[in-house]
């Protein structure tokens, strides 16, 4: 198998990069086995990378890097069961049109589709909706190659414990080769967004959650403003209120410029948040389209993000505390939005929603023109609140947790560790990020 030297890997947000010693793009299971054999021989570490979208260094390595982009075929479509089996390296963006052809869809999706199926589940990607779990819950079977080249098949009926671990695998159990996803019949969504206040949404949270299948809201820090977003099944024909001028000229270029100016005058941030809410979010907007076109949206520009899952009943307490912290420390600035989403509990060992219905609270600091904006005070205050209410960080995002934290957060942490050590006794699939998790 042919490898490349001198390839530099960078994640999408350009917050992390690395120079693997060798970079491989295998086209078959046999080639992956060869790379692993070489790694064992030369005592090298291996990292499998997908779309490179994780805003952390979870995919970085100075050893061997395996990019799965050429292993991206659809292997089987079972129309009766509405299940599809795909190679691990297929991008969601390429899977959607294929599912469309068969009249199928994924029941829930994250915001970005330039990501691989194996990567999406490995990092615990989620969206919103109290009936819906994280994306990993849509996986009904998967095959995995371990460090010694063995192929294991796991599902709800075989290798069950490994299946519960591998559905959020962090890239540390082996190389995922293929996955079977439980789909649903193709559907259209209508998205309706309308303005509200933080008090109204938090006081009536249960009503909102019951009212819309995929409910989320955006809070604009340094204000009371909230944009409520409902997404629900519809038979309406596709329509859009999107407009290049408002969405791009204003929502992108002007925003980036103003945020850049605010790096010199931080007191502007509160004003910018309120101005953009007034400008872009005070009207009611409706869009309808195929589900995957409504679920996915552009992430604007480069950014630092944190996203923790907390018990759902702590939503109000945590948000009000974050708001109080910003009011008490006028020097701490927070870009909009704080995005709040809700997810059903599951039984996947390292899922942030393990055994509890959760609220994800995503905070953001943009990097206008690539410039870093001071964020540590905001980050630290947020992490303190999240830990206090029993939060667990999103695996793909940057966080400062260590093994001690994870042992407290995850009842099944020792079980996952035992499975990992059994499958990868020499730590072939570890890197700097994972060492903080497991050591």
Image: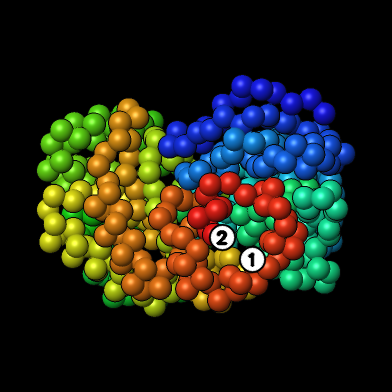
**Residue 139's spot in the image, x, y percent?**
71, 60
Q: Quadrant of residue 26?
A: top right
**Residue 350's spot in the image, x, y percent?**
58, 65
**Residue linked to disc 1:** 417
395 with respect to 304 (left or right) = right
**Residue 216's spot in the image, x, y percent?**
41, 60
Q: How many marks?
A: 2
The answer to whether one can see residue 287 in this image is yes
Tell me which residue sits at (18%, 51%) in the image.
332
The answer to whether one can see residue 163 in this image is no
At mark 1, the secondary structure is helix
**Residue 235's spot in the image, x, y percent?**
58, 56
Gap between marks 1 and 2, in whole Å? Answer: 7 Å
Badge 2 local density, few (<14 within 10 Å), some, or many (20+)?
Answer: some
- Quick one: label 1 or label 2, which is nearer the N terminus? 1
**Residue linked to disc 2:** 438
Badge 1 local density, few (<14 within 10 Å), some, or many (20+)?
Answer: some
Tell me which residue sits at (74%, 71%) in the image.
161
């Amino acid at each position: 198998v042919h490898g490349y030297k001198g390839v530099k890997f960078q994640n999408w947000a350009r917050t992390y990069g690395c120079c693997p010693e060798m970079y491989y793009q295998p086209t078959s299971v046999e080639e992956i086995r060869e790379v692993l054999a070489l790694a064992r021989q030369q005592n090298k570490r291996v990292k499998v990378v997908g779309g490179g979208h994780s805003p952390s260094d979870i995919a970085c390595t100075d050893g061997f890097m395996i990019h799965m982009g050429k292993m991206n075929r659809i292997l089987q479509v079972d129309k009766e069961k509405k299940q599809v089996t795909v190679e691990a390296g297929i991008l969601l963006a390429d899977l959607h049109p294929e599912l469309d052809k068969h009249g199928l869809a994924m029941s829930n999706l994250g915001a970005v589709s330039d990501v691989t199926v194996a990567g999406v589940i490995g990092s615990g990607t989620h969206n919103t909706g109290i009936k819906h779990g994280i994306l990993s819950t849509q996986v009904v079977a998967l095959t995995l190659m371990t460090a010694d080249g063995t192929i294991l098949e796991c599902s709800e009926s075989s290798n069950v414990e490994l299946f519960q671990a591998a559905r959020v695998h962090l890239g540390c159990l082996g190389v995922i080769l293929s996955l079977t996803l439980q789909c649903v019949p193709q559907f259209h969504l209508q998205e309706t967004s309308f303005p509200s206040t933080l008090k109204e949404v938090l006081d009536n949270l249960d009503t909102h959650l019951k009212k819309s299948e995929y409910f989320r809201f955006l809070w604009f820090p340094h204000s009371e403003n909230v944009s409520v977003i409902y997404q629900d099944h519809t038979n309406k024909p596709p329509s859009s209120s999107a407009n290049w001028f408002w969405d791009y000229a204003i929502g992108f270029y002007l925003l980036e410029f103003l945020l850049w100016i605010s790096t010199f005058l931080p007191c502007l941030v509160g004003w910018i948040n309120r101005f953009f809410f007034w400008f872009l979010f005070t009207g009611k907007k409706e869009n309808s389209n195929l589900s995957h076109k409504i679920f996915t949206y552009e992430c604007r520009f480069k950014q630092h993000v944190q996203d923790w899952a907390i018990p759902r009943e702590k939503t109000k307490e945590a948000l009000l505390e974050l708001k109080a912290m910003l009011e008490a420390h006028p020097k701490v600035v927070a870009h909009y939005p704080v995005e709040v989403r809700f997810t059903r509990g599951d039984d996947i060992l390292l899922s942030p929603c393990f055994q509890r219905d959760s609220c994800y609270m995503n905070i953001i600091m943009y990097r206008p023109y690539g410039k870093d904006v001071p964020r540590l005070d905001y980050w630290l205050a947020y992490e303190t609140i999240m830990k206090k209410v029993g939060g667990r960080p999103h695996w793909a995002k940057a966080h400062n947790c260590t093994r001690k934290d994870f042992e407290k957060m995850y009842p099944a942490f020792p079980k996952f560790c035992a499975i990992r050590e059994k499958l990868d006794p020499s730590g072939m699939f570890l890197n700097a990020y994972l060492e903080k998790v497991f050591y």
